[in-house]
Amino acid sequence: MRKAINQERMRSINKRQVFSCVKNHGPVSKKEIAELLGTSLTTVSTFINELIEEHKLTPSGTSKSTGGRKSEIFTLNPDALYCLGIDLQVDRLVSVVLNFNGEPVAGDSVPFQAPDEWEVAAAIRATIRDAVAQAGIDPAKLAHIGIGIPGIVDPDSCIVEFAPNLEWRNVNLRQLLALDQPLLIENEANAAALGEKVYGAGRLSANLCFISVGIGIGAGLILNNGLYRGASHHAGEFGHMTLDPDGPACRCGNHGCWEVFASNEAALKQYWHRTGRKLASYDHLLALAAAADPDAGAVLEEIATYLGIGIAGIVNGINPELVVVGGKIATCGEMLRNRLLKEIKERTLERTFRGLTVEFSSLGDRATALGVAEMALDRMV
């Protein structure tokens, strides 16, 4: 019995390898797949035929002649299945639909305010319906859904263990949503790191760190081309490393965390303390800075200083070749780049800084949604 199970598992692994080879190298011929995987042409042919019957692969013509017989080549069928990535932010839902080729075909960014988890669930279900309608696809072809969460999650059980900015503890999102499709969840910064690796600045980087700056601060790590979650899936919570033990209180229960000095919420508080004016939103602060308001500019310079201090610690610890800063602050990245780099350079080892590139995300608010959609796509073989 065990031998039969192991054989079936091995068969599934081999089939997935063939699929992944077409995904990563297509259009590609059976012979090329066999050579890339080091397996027999017969084995490749069997799995290619099965994947065509499942509508996951499609013939794509013939290879260019190199003097011999032309070979039939294969690629993914983009219309086979679709997946949806959702970034659950505190005040916004961002969605991206990917086709089977991993190409974005629809997406949206909708502000919302949900005082409890049941209303959040209703908003997520509405987002799913709207995304399917916007993409113009058969709902039956939406095969997998991923959701990025601003907090500590257990991806295996789909439980949000602690999301302080949502005021959630031990919320079982799979049970709460009760969706027809398989669901995965991931920490939003982890998902954004993968989004940058696949779709953004990190395509050529084996080791990168994504810094998510919002109401709080999170970090996602790609190490040796793979997402690093840590022993208990909690890696990357750098927003709660202590910069000043006597500093302001943080939602996590600690004092002086990095995010109380460098988050969007920290920026608004600093502006208020500096001017006596309470701004309605972080967008307002960015608009003032863009209009050369000296107080807004000074606040963002201070935020860049604290961001640099925190990033320097991460860089000294893991030595990535790339750091990507994401969130709304990325829209004024060029204004803050010099201050940020100055702080990082002053606080990192010389040889470590020499091999470092720092970028502001070009994916806007889609990095997390793209990342969880890519994770969902990876499970659809």
Image (cartoon, rainbow, N blue to C red):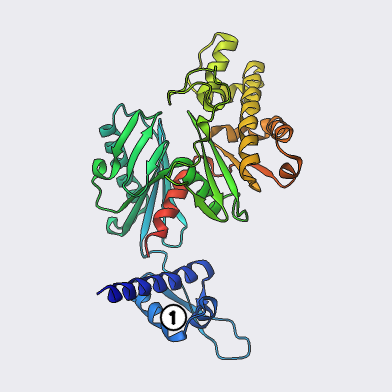
Image quarter for residue 148? Answer: top left
Q: Residue at x 53, y 35 (%)?
A: 238
Seen in the picture, residue 59 relative to 209 is either above or below; the reply is below
Mark 1 secondary-structure assignment: helix
Seen in the picture, residue 276 relative to 223 is either above or below; the reply is above
Q: Residue at x 67, y 21 (%)?
A: 292
Q: Residue at x 46, y 68 (%)?
A: 20
State the residue in front, 66 or 16: 16
Quadrant in which the C terminus appears: bottom left
Answer whether residue 232 is visible to the viewer in this image.
Answer: yes
Residue 227 location (% of width, % of height): 50, 51
Q: Name the residue type under label 1.
A: Val
Residue 70 location (% of width, % of height): 54, 87
Answer whether residue 213 is visible to the viewer in this image.
Answer: no
Is residue 70 left or right of 336 when viewed as pictured?
A: left
Residue 120 location (% of width, % of height): 30, 34
Seen in the picture, residue 277 relative to 4 is either above or below; the reply is above
Q: For label 1, count other residues whose C-alpha is less than 10 Å away and answer few (under 14), some (14-19) or many (20+).
A: many
Quadrant in which the N terminus appears: bottom left
Residue under numbered circle 1: 44
Residue 90 location (% of width, % of height): 40, 31
State the residue in front, 359 or 93: 359
